[in-house]
Image: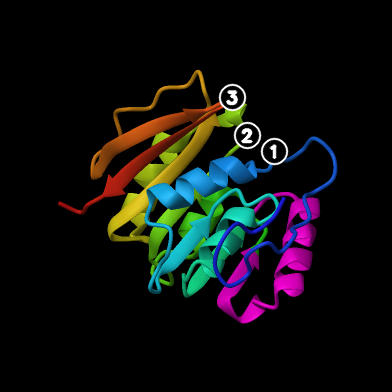
């Protein structure tokens, strides 16, 4: 697993050991970032189920100012810390270990994100609930893009209030679904 483009291009990332996490494949990450613009001129990125931190670190490499990398697994958070240290980007990110709902509630009013990457365990998809919670907590900037990774067989076209379905794409066994947030 590696950073695909930008400041940290070609740098190798560690992945947590075992079957607890499922890192996003490089080819999927490359397609996702190409789809949302490829490069950024600042902004903030939330990697809600970060695993190795690869998605948030890719966002930093491509020009995001800040990434919050969260996972509930101790092993995943340790791997994220090692990856952040290896890249030397600790001043541009924050690593947290908490549940998705607790993170949203904890940082309401402190952070507002331009992009959110959600890659929960596929069997525990509750993305509508989490999207609604993010909306109520006010942690999304108007126009934010939410990216949902799921199994290819899943279909999530209708979003909750304030989220407009943009598109989805299938890459092997993975489906990526995009929503745009608007307060209306």
Residue 30 image position (x, y, % from top left): 53, 48
Location of mark 3 (residue)? 173
Is disc 3 in contact with disc 2, using a CB cutoff of under 8 Å? no
The crowding category of the residue bearing disc 3, from other C-alpha atoms within 10 Å (few below 14, some 14 to 19, many at least 20), is few
Q: Which residues are magenta?
A: 71-95
Image location of residue 167, percent across then percent down: 32, 35
The magenta stretch spans residue 89: yes
Helix, strand or loop for disc 2: loop
Q: Position of residue 77 (x, y in %)?
A: 74, 58
Image position, residue 58 (x, y; %): 57, 60
Residue sitting at x 39%, y 47% = 35
Picture disc at residue 121? 2
Tags 2 and 1 in contact by the CB under 8 Å rule? Answer: yes
Q: Indicate which disc, 3 or 2, sits on the residue closer to the N terminus.
A: 2
Mark 2, other Cα within 10 Å: few <14 / some 14–19 / many ≥20: some
Per the image, label 1 sits on a secondary structure element best described as loop
In this view, the residue farthest toward the right is: 17
Mark 3–mark 2 distance (CA, rounded to whole Å): 14 Å
Q: Which is nearer the eye, 15 or 25?
A: 25
Q: Quadrant of residue 98?
A: bottom right
- Above or below: residue 93 compared with residue 2: below
In terms of secondary structure, where does tag 3 sit?
loop
Residue lying at 46% horizontally and 39% vertically, measured from the top left: 148
Task: Estimate the spatial distance between the alpha carbons at disc 3 and disc 1, rounded to whole Å.
Answer: 12 Å
Residue mark closest to the camera, 2 vs 1: 1
- Going 66% across and 77% down the picture, which residue do you hit? 90
Closer to us: 97 or 179: 179
- Label for residue 80? none
Q: Residue furthest bottom?
A: 91
Question: Callout 1: few (<14), some (14-19), or many (20+) C-alpha neighbours within 10 Å?
Answer: some
- Label 1: which residue? 22
């Amino acid at each position: 697993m590696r950073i695909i483009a930008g400041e940290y291009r070609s740098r190798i990332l560690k992945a947590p050991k075992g079957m607890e996490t499922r890192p996003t494949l490089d080819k999927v990450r490359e397609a996702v970032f190409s789809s949302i613009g490829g490069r950024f001129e600042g902004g903030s990125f939330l990697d809600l189920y970060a695993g190795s931190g690869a998605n948030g670190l890719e966002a930093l490499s491509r020009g995001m100012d800040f990434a919050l990398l969260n996972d509930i697994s101790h092993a995943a958070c340790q791997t994220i810390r090692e990856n952040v240290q290896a890249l030397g980007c600790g001043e541009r990110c924050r690593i947290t270990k908490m549940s998705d709902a607790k993170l949203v509630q904890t940082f309401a009013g402190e952070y507002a994100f331009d992009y959110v990457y959600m890659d929960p365990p596929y069997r525990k998809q509750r993305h509508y609930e989490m999207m609604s919670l993010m909306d109520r907590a006010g942690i999304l900037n108007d126009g934010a893009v939410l990216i949902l990774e799921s199994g290819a067989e899943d279909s999530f076209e209708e979003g909750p209030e304030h989220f407009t379905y943009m598109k989805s794409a299938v890459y092997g066994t993975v489906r990526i679904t995009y929503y745009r947030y608007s307060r209306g």
